[in-house]
Image: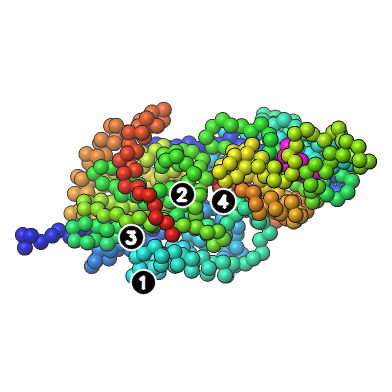
Amino acid sequence: MGSNFKITYSVDMVFCIDCTGSMDNIINIVKDNALNFYQDLTAAMDAKSKKVSQLRVRVVAFRDYQYDLEDAMLVTDFFNLPEQAEDFERCVRSLEAKGGGDDPEDGLEALAYAIKSKWNTEGVKKRQVIVVWTDDATHPLGFGKVKSNGAPNEFYPNGMAQDLNELASWWGGGQYNGFMDNNAKRLLLYAPDAPDWSSIARNWDNVLHFPSEAGSGLTELEYNEIISTITNTI
Amino acid sequence: MKNAKKVIRLNLIFRVAGEMIPENGEDSCAFCGSDTNHKSLISVFDGCGGIGSKRYSNYSGKTGAFIASRAVCGGVCAWFENGFDDADTLKEYINRSLSVCSGFADKTGRLSGSLGKSFPTTAAIIYSVPKSAHLDSTCFWAGDSRCYMLDMEGLHQLSTDDVDGEDAFSNISGDGVLKNVISASKPFKVHAEKFSFDHPCILICATDGCFAYLSSPMDFEQLLTGTMLSAKNISEWKILLEKNLRKFAGDDFTLCVAAYGFKDFESMQKYFLKRNKYVHNNYIVPETDIQEKWNLYKDSYCSYMKTDSSQ
């Protein structure tokens, strides 16, 4: 009587991690969060009979283009998990908190890299999750196009979104598609209640914002709420 | 007395429910039937655990989803008990329930963003009144819980899913987004549609835990009639329904049933025997052939769906 419909998901996650000097005291907590997050999420999905058939994780470590030049952005390919779990852990553990210059960082450029990831498009049910950990506000997009002496910055990427409006169109929403699947995408911000982060949390679809210093002050209850929200929003 | 019209009567009314985590299920339901005028209300509510996962310390640490399904259920019961039957007052009662939830909720949470909603829940409600030889039923709904009517022609969905998907089958196998849901923080619609049935039928309200983990709507129909035909009486039908739904469901499940126009349970079984065999022989197929069979099945399944009028 009846036959069971097995729900399987492919899950892609991109972890954008602020690696500037101000993160020094919490970078290890963020690393632990990043390493535990995918395991906690897949366990929660499993508990809801949502089997994860393919899991991939990618890292975007960011600083400040104007100050850190060629060290401003570290971008990896996707790691297939659990097969490449050791490589992923080695990558996360190797991140160092340094540089950054002034207080705002280039978190929006990191978010842009994340949005333009080569997402898995196979299968019906997908999750495309971006998590941002930062303790600072953002520069406006394009701030790092020039060096601090006013000369063009050859390390700033070509084809970057020009402003927050263009980045919003990359995210997509409502009737129009961006670079991500509108049904599958989720953005989780561990970021201060600064103008651009707050604007994204309010105005973009499918965003959760935990306004605090990255990786610190999150209670177990709040962490479970985040995992539950991402797991259960279909 | 030869010309006296036959009055359609309420034969049975019950609910079947199961929770994934005991005492933490986010579904709720209410049903009520009258022995005298044979009016009935069946209703189910599915608190949305993802967007409503915030826990409230002054509600015993329960989630917004858990609280919403029960509060809105209470509002719908009060609406029915106070003798209302229209969509305008229904929405007023729902809003009043949500206001009470919000008013007493602690405001301590730090999580914000567009993904969360305050006290979100779906609703599927059928209010029925026999009028001499026919049954007037009104369906009210919001979200992806469903109202159905089951008769000799098969299972018919009366509500239209508030899901960004192609049809009732793709909505369960796909990954469509919920477009409309009751909540305290965002505007919502309560859809309302009236129906008139002049033949024996079973009315059903179901949360997605009942049907979304089965391969197709055909399998759901087969589960409903198959358990009925295997049962010796109504109590056993309930037990078999619960047992079979629990076997497949990957979520909380709640089903409310009201049957009208049958002489007794045995005559109900006889009425559905032929249909059950037909569905078994023609529509219960391997997964590779389901889409093809759905294409044949869906005309009848969708034949009662109307362009909605919403609140």
Q: Main secondary structure of the magenta part?
A: helix
- Number of the label disc, if any, that sits on residue B162: 2
**Residue appearing at x 52%, y 35% in the figure:** A124
Up/down of A93 relative to B251, above or below: above
**Residue appearing at x 88%, y 49% in the figure:** A102
Query: Which mark lies nearer to you, 3 or 2?
Result: 2
Q: Is residue B45 visible to us here?
A: no
| Disc 2 crowd, CA 10 A, few/some/many (<14, 14-19, 20+) | many
Query: Which mark lies nearer to you, 4 or 1?
Result: 1
**Range shown magenta:** A106-113
**Of B217 and A4, which appears nearest the observer?**
B217
Measured Cα–Cα span from mark 4 to mark 1: 33 Å
Quadrant in which the N terminus of chain A is drawn: top left
- Amino acid carrying mark 3 in the image: Tyr
Residue at disc 1, secondary structure:
loop
Measured Cα–Cα span from mark 3 to mark 1: 13 Å
Which chain does the residue under circle 3 lie in? B
State yes or no: residue B303 in magenta.
no
Measured Cα–Cα span from mark 2 to mark 1: 28 Å
Residue at disc 4, secondary structure:
loop
Disc 1 target residue = B82
Measured Cα–Cα span from mark 4 to mark 2: 16 Å
**Residue appearing at x 81%, y 47% in the figure:** A139
Disc 3 target residue = B127
| Marked residue nearer the N-terminal end (4 or 1) | 4
